[in-house]
Amino acid sequence: MTEPVPETRKSRARVVAAGMIGNVIEWYDFALYGFMAVIISELFFPHGDKTVSLLATYGVFAAGFMMRPLGALFFGHLGDTIGRKPVLIISVVMMVLPTILLGLMPTYQDWGITASICLVLIRLLQGFSVGGEFSSSATFMVETAPMDRRGLAGSWANCGAVAGTVLGAGTPATVIWILGESAVDDWGWRIPFLLGGLVGVIGLLLRRGLPEEEAPPEKREPGDHPIVRVFREERDVLLRVIIFTSAYGVLYYLPMVYLPTWQSLYSDIKLHEALFIATLAMALQMVLVPLVGHFTDWGMRRTHFLALIFGLVGVVALPLFILTETGIVWLVIMVYVAFAALIAGPLGAVPTTLVEAFDRGHRLTGYSVSFNIGMAFAGGTAPMVATALIAVSGTHYAPAGYLALAGLVGASVLLLMRDHSREELR
């Protein structure tokens, strides 16, 4: 692996900013959709049973994730064959367009079932583009960083994700607070989606100015596809990462996206109040995530640290959900802070861990495909599965059990993964 060339603080800051901005857009939109699920269910699906409408809305949320593995394969192949920079530019353009379209689209009242279909198509297009975004930006930042700062470099990708999630929670909460619920239900719900388009323009400008890669894509023989190499040379690594990222997806999306909706249904806390509390808790993550990345560069090895955090989540999931249901504001705040602090662990350490898991020649393909399969089939379906588990089991604590299971599975798989945090990139 070629060592990164010396760079000025200004050029490194540009790389970090350009890498983060796409993740801001990605997580802003997905968090926005998750946080506004109750409103969207009433706007784009037939009125009737609220549970059925909510399940349909979360189903569309999951459908967007289902396209991520296809996007991961497409963008991963491009990144490993023509380079990381073109992928970063293409993916940010393809993410912004669906966000703007959703903000302009007629509702079910105007278009009927056509509006529901268009919503699905928009989410599919966005899911496809997101499939290459996060892994491409994380890989680019880690590959261009010195070995003893790779953890910190990778953590910036999730700083962008956290910032996007904070904006995705804070923007609708602020809009509801300023305009009122009736105006938001009528037309104000469009504002948060259209604002995402402005962020996308900034992201495109930043990425067009990125430096070229120090290590160009390797020359390949005809038929030598990155995905073939992954399955031939690192099949075991691929399988473990898929299982791990499945648990990681549940670990993130249940507390950070689904919990405010759950709380608005099963406690006296209203949705906009839960969103404000979640926003404050996630703002804490923006401080903790880079600290975690830096810590794994010199302290505990990344896989060992992650196994500890996942195990802790498995133990405390149910007690924290029970405390959240009380509706006592200070207790609810403490629960959200606890979840945010725990999840800051994987947010800070996972990107670099997954970059280090694969060889350079097929790294982006291996990372993108494994990460997005796990996120699609477990992370993207987490809110829908949690809602369905409540209906099937008859207990609203079912999501806590699902979260605990994900924590224990993730911890177990991590103990089987080789740690490369003190080695040169292959």
Image (spheres, rainbow, N blue to C red):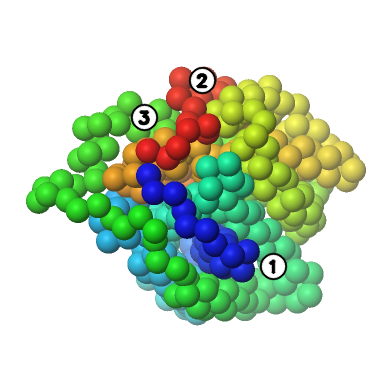
Mark toward the start of the polypeptide (1 vs 3): 1
Is any atom of residue 351 visible in this view?
A: yes
Question: Can residue 33 be seen in the rendering of this structure?
Answer: no
In front: label 1 or label 3: 3
**Separation (CA) of disc 3 from disc 2:** 13 Å
Nearer to me, 290 or 403: 290
Q: In the rendering, which numbered label is found on residue 315?
A: none
Q: Residue at x 59, y 65 (%)?
A: 8
Residue at the far left: name it: 222
Instruction: Report which residue position mark 2 lands on.
Output: 415
Where is residue 292, by image quadrant?
top right
For the N terminus, which image quadrant?
Answer: top left
> Is disc 1 surrounded by few (<14), some (14 to 19) or many (20+) residues within 10 Å?
many
The residue under the point 34% across, 39% down is 359
Mark 3: few, some, or many residues within 10 Å (few <14, many ≥20)?
some
User: Which dot marks residue 237?
Assistant: 3
Residue found at x 52% / y 58%: 6
| Front position among marks 1 and 2 | 2
Disc with the residue nearer the chain's start (1 vs 2)? 1
Element carrying mark 3: helix
Snapshot quadrant of residue 350: top right
101 or 49: nearer the viewer? 101
* Residue found at the very far front of the displayed protein: 6
Amino acid marked by disc 3: Val
Work out whether mark 3 precedes mark 2 in sequence or the reverse, and give the earlier one: 3
Q: What residue type is disc 2 on? A: Leu
> What numbered label is drawn on residue 171?
1
Are circles 1 and 2 on residues that touch, CB within 8 Å?
no
Give the Cα separation between the discs numbered 1 and 3.
Answer: 39 Å
Where does residue 371 sit, x and y in percent of width and height?
A: 42, 42
Residue 261, x across and y down, in percent: 67, 49
From the top left corner, tell me how far across and down residue 388 is, in percent: 52, 38
